[in-house]
Image (tube, grey):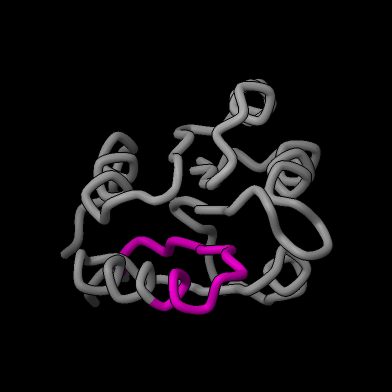
Amino acid sequence: MAEQPPLVVVVEDDDMLRAALGRLLRTSGFDPALFDSAEAFLAAPLNRAPHCVIVDVHLTGISGLDLQDRLRRQHSEVPVIVTTADGAQKIRERAQQGGCTAFVSKPFSGETILNALGSMARPSLA
């Protein structure tokens, strides 16, 4: 039986960016799970652990940084890539203190996201 592609969760409230990230991930060999809010992600019954979570800082409801904190409190080891259009140093510092794997400023290229994902151990596909 063939191994499934790595699941990458995207939590982004911008519809166009979320869809674009989904296409990029799919064509790059990942299985994207797309959510428009942290609440939708937390309520979703995922059938396997994500390879990574890509999350925007500024979301309606639970913020991306609060979602990262919640994942860590649940002892989740899933890598988190934090994205934001707000390049304030205090946001970067909080994301890094919270254990983010990468901090990506918007606008970003697909290559930037793929490089951040590439820095993580990626399971081989059969």
Q: Is residue 61 left or right of residue 119?
A: right
Magenta residues span: 5-19
Q: Work out which quarter of the rendered image holds the C terminus and state it.
A: bottom left
Which is nearer the eye, 46 or 82? 82
User: Is residue 12 a member of the stretch shown in magenta?
Assistant: yes
Q: Is residue 28 left or right of residue 68?
A: left
Q: Is residue 76 left or right of residue 70?
A: left
Q: Work out which quarter of the rendered image holds the N terminus and state it.
A: bottom left
Q: Residue at x 34, y 49 (%)?
A: 108
Q: Is residue 99 above or below residue 44?
A: above
Which is nearer the eye, 53 or 64? 64
Q: Residue at x 58, y 63 (%)?
A: 11
> Residue 51: x and y, percent?
44, 53
* Quadrant of the image occupied by residue 32: bottom left
Q: Residue at x 49, y 43 (%)?
A: 81
Q: Residue at x 29, y 34 (%)?
A: 119
* Quadrant of the image occupied by residue 90: top right
* Quadrant of the image occupied by residue 93: top right
Q: Is residue 31 left or right of residue 60?
A: left
